[in-house]
Image (cartoon, coloured by chain):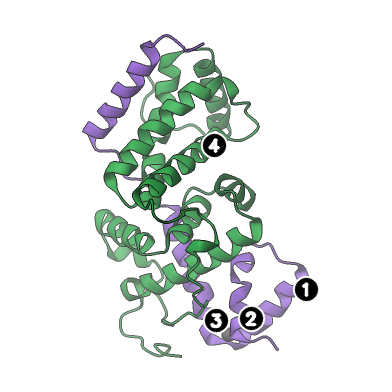
Amino acid sequence: MKSPEAVPAPVSEALDEAAIVARARAGDPQAFAELVERYERQIYRLARHITHNDEDAEDVLQETFLKAYENLPGFQGQSKFYTWLVRIAVNEALMKLRKRRSSKVVSLDETFDTGEETVAREIAVWEDHPEEQYSREELRRILEEAIDSLPPLYRTVFVLRDVDELSTEETAGVLGISIPAVKSRLLRARLQLRDKLTRYFKRKQEDLFAYL
Amino acid sequence: MLTCKQFLEELADYLDGELAEEVRRELDGHLAECPNCWVIVDTTKKTLQIYKGMEARPLPPELHARLMKALQRKMTQPPER
Ligand SMILES: [Zn+2]
């Protein structure tokens, strides 16, 4: 048994993961279970952000890992395992969305673009470590609500790029959209989030820059 | 001289350090003179820092259990040929 203090360094973690994936591919169910434990939270969070529905998100979570298990022999290891999983999860989540809104064509492309201007409304200085004013739980609620209030493609791009830290290229590949499309949505997502968070994080008595 | 709107259009690449030296200098110039854009850069940076540290919530135990059960079923099933 590993002691909880033995936190592996990032490099060994990557090697470690390649080894686990190899064991899983060789048919070791324990190894696959380890991969599930490692990524289930992130996949579920992503699925919830795309579908906005707990039940659908659970289906997506299950389908993603079932398909991953099934298709594991086809995983070549050129991409990170997580990126490969995300690709499956995004497809599953989009299928759910299509079923829910069967009358409309749903994809993560321009149709979701609200065409909103990149105007930053709230200009107020924030605290130096604004997150420290809130408990872990409060902070998580604030951050998740802010993400959930974004249009679907914005929140998906933001979660992949800025929370899960995929590259721009990986995000474009996973979502099947162009790199400029990722960039422009990421910009708008970031600005909208910044705007929404300002009311929680702004410095209390300073209203010097409150309005443009 | 850049307008604020032009500045903001480049903001994502600016924060990601993906701009050509020349463009970057131009943006730095705007930033030095525009308190509003300075605030936006600072608060957007903080937004990203805060989100990067956000761990996904653990799955509710019953949800995890249902997932593992579904996988178990799959794994004990003979592979389709
Ligand atoms: Zn400006």
The quarter of the image holding the N terminus of chain A is top left
Q: Is residue A6 visible?
A: no
Residue in the image at 49% along x and 66% along y:
A190
Residue in the image at 25% along x and 54% along y:
A137
Label 2 belongs to which residue?
B6
Residue A10, numbered circle: 4
- Which chain is tinted green? A
Name the image quarter holding residue A132.
Answer: bottom left
Q: How crowded is the residue under tag 2: few (<14 C-alpha within 10 Å), some, or many (20+)?
A: few
> Marks 4 and 3: CB-CB under 8 Å?
no
**Ligand 1 within 8 Å, label 1 CB:** no
Q: Chain of mark 4?
A: A
Amino acid under disc 2: Gln
Percent coordinates x, y for residue B5 in the rendering: 59, 82
- Residues at marks 3 and 1, CA–CA distance in whole angstroms: 19 Å
- Residues at marks 2 and 1, CA–CA distance in whole angstroms: 15 Å
Q: Colour of chain B?
A: purple
- Residues at marks 2 and 3, CA–CA distance in whole angstroms: 11 Å
Residue B50, numbered circle: none
Amino acid under disc 3: Cys
Do badges 2 and 3 share one subunit?
A: yes
2 or 3: mark nearer the eye: 2
Label 1 belongs to which residue?
B22
Residue in the image at 22% along x and 32% along y:
B62
Label 3 belongs to which residue?
B37
Do badges 3 and 1 share one subunit?
A: yes
